[in-house]
Amino acid sequence: MTRVIGCGNLHRGDDAAGLLAARRLHELGVASAGCSGEALSLMDGWAGAESVILIDAVVSGQPPGTITVWDPLAAPLPRECFMGSTHAFGVAEAIELARVLRRLPPQLTLYGIEGARFDQGSPPSPEVLMAVERVAQEIAQCTNPRS
């Protein structure tokens, strides 16, 4: 079974993308969890899972709402894309630490949703909300055979 984890902060605009996707997946009948994205909570969240899908907001210079999918097992993540996080030690660092500690799941996929605004108290942008729905639908189709 695949474990789906959405990362982010609901109170920082587009940083809510991963958490909103996890919430939407739950509505679609897919088991999912939310996480702040801190390294230790992420590693605990995927402990024992054979397959993990992470969803997080990224900043890579693409237009807001752009979806990028990475295979972090194949190559290290571009850390500069995860600078929108409220934590200095976030998703990219958690994956690299888990790699060193040999605590990565056997299969790991990361969906990055390009964000633009991360101000405290700001709502997610419309482009990010549309991307959240696209990511949730795609994951639901892949993980839920009834979809």
Image: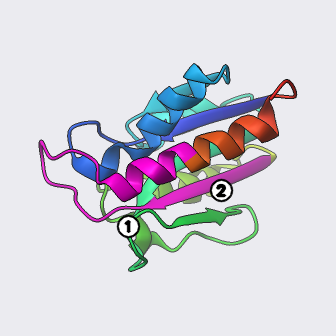
Of residues 97 and 22, the one drawn nearer to the viewer in this rendering: 22
Instruction: Name the outermost residue toward the right.
Output: 145
Q: CA distance from mark 2 to mark 1?
A: 30 Å
Q: Secondary structure under badge 1? A: loop
Residue 75 at what x, y percent from top left?
69, 72
Of labels 2 and 1, earlier in sequence is 1
Where residue 110 sits in the image (x, y, percent)? 62, 54
Disc 1 designates what residue? 64
Q: Nearer the viewer, residue 121 or 92?
A: 121
The answer to which image quadrant residue 80 occupies is: bottom left
Asked where in the image residue 70 lies, by quadrant, the reply is: bottom right
91 left or right, relative to 5: left
Query: Helix or strand or loop: what does disc 2 sit on?
Result: helix
Identify the residue at horizontal 43%, vertical 78% (top origin).
62
Snapshot quadrant of residue 85: bottom left
Residue 120 location in percent, x, y?
A: 12, 46
**Region rendered in magenta:** 107-133
The residue under label 2 is which amino acid type?
Arg
In the rendered image, residue 121 lying in the magenta stretch gets the answer yes
Give above or below for 42 relative to 119.
above
**Left or right of 64 on screen, residue 104:** right
**The N terminus lies in quadrant:** top right
Relative side of 22 to 85, left or right: right
**Residue at position x 33%, y 53% in the image:** 126
Circle 2 sits on which residue? 99
Residue 61 visible, this orientation = yes
User: Where's the C terminus, which quadrant?
Assistant: top right
Of 120 and 85, nearer the camera is 120
Judge whether 110 appears above or below 7 on screen.
below
As drawn, 129 above or below 28: below
